[in-house]
Amino acid sequence: MEFPPFTLVTPTDEQVQDAAHAIRELEPGLGQLKLLARLKEENNWTLSEKRFRRLVPSTFAAGIDAAIAEALKILEEDEDEDDYEDGCSSDSEFDDASGESMGYGHYEELDDSDGEDDEADLEAEGAKEGHPGERKAVFTDSRKLADDAFAKQIGWRTRTVRLKWNFKLTDEHIDKIVALSPAVCDNFRDFIFESEDARPLLEIEVVKVNEVKEWGDWELHITSQTYQDGKEVTDLPFAADMGLQGMDDDTEYNNYLTTGDISEEYLARYGY
């Protein structure tokens, strides 16, 4: 698939918001680019392997596998919280299945129990570095913020380990993304820059939340950001959190939070 030529224009805030809203409306096609997978404390998928693979384009499988392996290694080694200091990192590279795309990863450990805004500190620190692969941005959404506030209100101690895994999209990746849904084409093309250095980056984030009774759940997020000349232009909301978007039935959402599973009806309804 070839894209017609277009002019690179830095969007205004209003244009970014309008585009973000338009992309969110395309959730059925774009939702496959974002996965929320919950793991049990013993590291078993609560989403079956079959469903996991159905939700992730094969283009990204190798990169996702590498990120999961690295993340679980970090989380398994993190049983003693004193082993790590805030801000330590683990960097590595990998080739995806096509052998064309290189990835760069690091993780941050945040201790939210002191009530201080550690995430804001990391955001500011990462912005100074000016390199997309090293930027310590933290992905959040309103539901997660509400959950965090509730956890603190009832006395849970929330500690988060995050793994960011970035890799650039090749032309092959872009073709497969656009092919996910005909409606995606025009909207997504507007965010693909001609400069190789400005291609969107996918980010994989692993989150561990511990409660005082040692109950835990694990979450894996895949998000995307676009950079121009080393600076973030805008977040690309390829899709809202797959486990939350479209769940307007409280029963279905509560069941998802409890079991980490997603009904076949939901998957069918949104084209997965």
Image (cartoon, grey):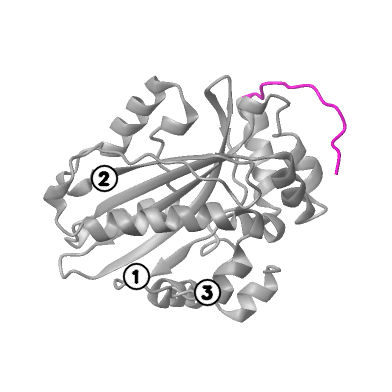
Q: Nearer the viewer, residue 96 or 147?
A: 96
Disc 1 designates what residue? 43
Q: Secondary structure at mark 2?
A: strand
Disc 2 designates what residue? 109
Residue 32 place in picture, x, y as percent: 63, 59
Type of amino acid under label 3: Glu
Q: Secondary structure at mark 1?
A: loop
Is residue 2 inside the magenta stretch? yes
Q: Can you see residue 267?
A: yes
Q: Is residue 128 above or below residue 97?
A: above
Query: Taken as a whole, is the magenta stretch helix, strand or loop?
Result: loop
Residue 105 falls left or right of residue 152: right
**What segment is highlighted magenta in the picture?**
1-12
Residue 51 place in picture, x, y as percent: 57, 73
Q: Nearer the viewer, residue 87 or 12?
A: 87
Residue 33 falls left or right of residue 178: left
The residue depicted at 53 percent of the width and 22 percent of the height is: 230
Neighbourhood count class around disc 3 (C-alpha, 10 Å): few under 14, some 14–19, many 20 upward = few
Disc 3 designates what residue? 49
Q: Secondary structure at mark 3?
A: helix
Q: Earlier in the sequence, mark 1 or mark 3?
A: 1
Q: Is residue 76 above or below residue 166?
A: below
Type of amino acid under label 1: Asn
The residue depicted at 25 percent of the width and 36 percent of the height is: 87
The residue depicted at 61 percent of the width and 26 percent of the height is: 197
